[in-house]
Image: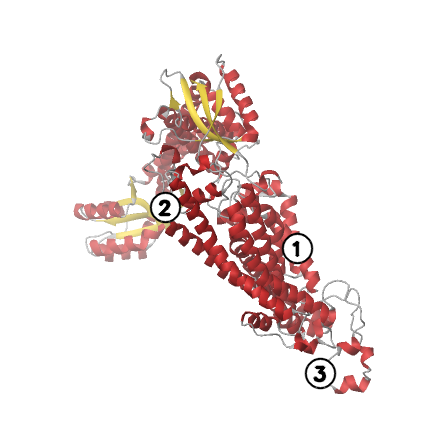
Amino acid sequence: MGSLYRSEEMTLAQLFLQSEAAYACVSELGELGVVQFRDLNPDVNAFQRKFVNEVRRCDEMERKLRFLEKEIKKANIPILDTGENPEAPPPREMIDLEATFEKLENEMKEVNTNQEALKRNFLELTELKHILRKTQNFFDEQMHDPSLAEESHALLGEEGMRPGQAMRLGFVAGVIPRERIPSFERMLWRACRGNVFLKQAEIESPLEDPSTGDQVHKTVFIIFFQGDQLKSRVKKICEGFRATLYPCPETQAERREMAMGVMTRIEDLQTVLGQTQDHRHRVLASAAKNIKVWFIKVCKIKAIYHTLNLFNLDVTQKCLIAECWCPVADLDSIQQALRRGTERSGSSVPSILNRMQTKEEPPTYNRTNKFTNAFQAIVDAYGVACYREINPAPYTIITFPFLFAVMFGDTGHGLIMALFALWIVIYEKKLAASAKESEMWGTIYGGRYVILLMGLFAIYSGLIYNDIYSKSINLFGSSFIVSHANYTNSTIRNNEFLQLDPQTTYTGSPYPFGFDPIWRISLNELTFTNSFKMKLSVIFGVMQMMFGVFLSLLNHRYFNKPLNIFCEFIPQVLFLFCMFGYLVIMIFIKWFKFDAATSSNAPSLLIVIINMFLLTPVPEAQLLFAGQNQLQVFLVLVVVLCVPWMLFIKPIYLYVQNNKRLKLGLQFGNVRMIVNGGNGEDMAEVLQNDSLATTDTDSQTEEDKPKFDFGDVFILQAIHTIEYCLGCISNTASYLRLWALSLAHAELSLVLWEMVMRIGLSVEGYLGSVVLFGVFAFWAVLTIAILLIMEGLSAFLHALRLHWVEFQNKFYVGDGHLFAPFSFEIIMESKEE
């Protein structure tokens, strides 16, 4: 399993890079992606660091690229993505990139400004064209329709407009957005007291707003009035409603001549606009071919200079000093990357890597691939493993989908889930791009292998339960034969409820695989399956918890802590085995010992466990084996003795050892240098884990070093003891969720079949096929929505809890910090997200 079983061995290294080679060396390390740099200038303001100007220049280049990208998307031009991953360009190329981006930005801004001005002129001329056309229609109607003349005469009074005298009145013409017409008309009527005459006509096609590019519906209007006072009032109202007024000649000949001029200018503008649009499209299409590569280059340059700001300058100003965490296994690769960077820069002085000794805890680094990454993410979501602590991820690969399947045991539902995940796995390269666009789909895509295993395990557990969409399959024939019961036809017809007697109908050979299909039609099916699944949940729970305790032994041995093995591991194993391990053994004994003839004498195991701690003997008729009562008394004594064993021995031992050292005149902080074995390590660990020691032990003075406090150590041990003892009971009960969720899933599936599918199956004839088609569609939707998505998510969360709380708390501390390497690949992925 490599580093998946236990995190990579890490080392703190110091790098000495020549100033002219630092950029190229960091670039090579970014491509390698296995080095985590430390900030050696934590007290220096970000704006006072050496390469802050270069970072600002990169920010400015990114701003220009985002502007170009926005214009490209606005023009609906596809951005070419060849998948090319160029190396970080040398520093001198920054000037060429800046000049290119500056030229493109200025050119696009100039083109956009000119295009907006041309579109604004085109809009004004188009509106003027419609005004001239519509107003001519108004005047023609006014001259030839006496009813309109009478209406205007009534509105404008006795001295108003008469037929043949319309031109003697003043008027203004313009356009206004269509939605403002009702309020505009009311305002004119109220402000002018009905002494104006308004005519309007809608412009059929929408007009483009040059500022926003939106399509706007507008209306042409002409307002007749008499007198300068009304003219001023009308213009203010038009201005308030943001109506655009245009000059309109009074005579027909002038209007015709203006209209011809407007049409000529519109044609010229359309030609110029077309040429401008073509030029803009050519510029953006050319930029779209390279913008992805430009983004990658600028991002890498910025990341390099940001990293260089973490380094220190030596006194000669010719060398940069860096500190970094890196895996020991990758030291050769790092050395080669430094050599390549030095050669690229042309420097004659090689870069130096020097391993450092430190007491600081290194970061945790587990190498993963696309299959194991999702399982590692499940573990890290609870807490990152401590350095070199056993990683639960490799065991989670099997136990997580298995426990999920115990709760989600249905072959049909598991098959749908597995096929869905298999489709994602097969087309994962095509679906990778869409996974970045949606967070929900991205989560499903990232967990595709988890879903695939959950589906496969659910198929297996569904075959064990013989449950396929709430139905069972008779693959091997039932082990119960009705003919053995000597039932006659009259017996079957005249009795509504019949019960098979296992003593007379059982063939003697068990069903080859899974549940016998006879249980699906039996009245006591729920009683049998509940009993089986409940016991199975306890067995799986105790086995997984016991496995977790044994994993803690591997941790104690690796970190050389024999005191923890004797004072924690051994009593923990005895406590768990004597209480719940014994319960599991009794479950198997009960299954093998009792049959249909003797099942009435079988004891209740829950009552046996309760009576065991009450020291109540088991009746002779219900004994599972000889000497059971004596063994149970012994197990209770062991369980009781394990509590003080875990609680007192370790603190007392540490107290005695500390007194011995005090008599020798030694400080507890020096115990690691003079004590052989693991006892001193245990004492120092207790203090460090409980915040009794500072994190930076290198800088401590003799007076500042932590002193041993028996009270704190005892309280810590008491907390761990109580947590483990009570946790064994509560955690075992928590595994009963395997039974509860399995029951809920099976019953929901049965309810859907009984209440939905049975409707379609009950209708006969041609009508039945039509009804069945619709009912099946409805049943399928409910099955996917409720049983696959909702129930699947519920089982997923419960399996997550069983691993995080019930399993990992037996051996997993999980208070480490992740290794965050300087990697261009990770930086680019975060940028895309």
Residue tagged 3: 497
Using the image as rendered, state which of residue 483 and residue 47 is in the foreground.
Answer: 483
Quadrant of res 630: bottom right
- By what rule are the colours in the image chosen? secondary structure
Q: Is residue 111 visible?
A: no
Amino acid carrying mark 2 in the image: Lys
Q: Residues within 10 Å of mark 3 (few under 14, many from 20)?
A: few
Residue 235: % across, % down: 23, 45
Using the image as rendered, state which of residue 619 and residue 290 is in the foreground.
Answer: 619
Amino acid carrying mark 3 in the image: Phe
Residue sitting farthest toward the top: 348
Using the image as rendered, state which of residue 38 and residue 476 is in the foreground.
Answer: 38
Quadrant of res 619: bottom right
Q: Secondary structure at mark 1?
A: helix
Q: Residues within 10 Å of mark 2 (few under 14, many from 20)?
A: many
Using the image as rendered, state which of residue 250 and residue 88 is in the foreground.
Answer: 88
Residue tagged 2: 134
Residue tagged 1: 457
202 to the left or right of 582:
left
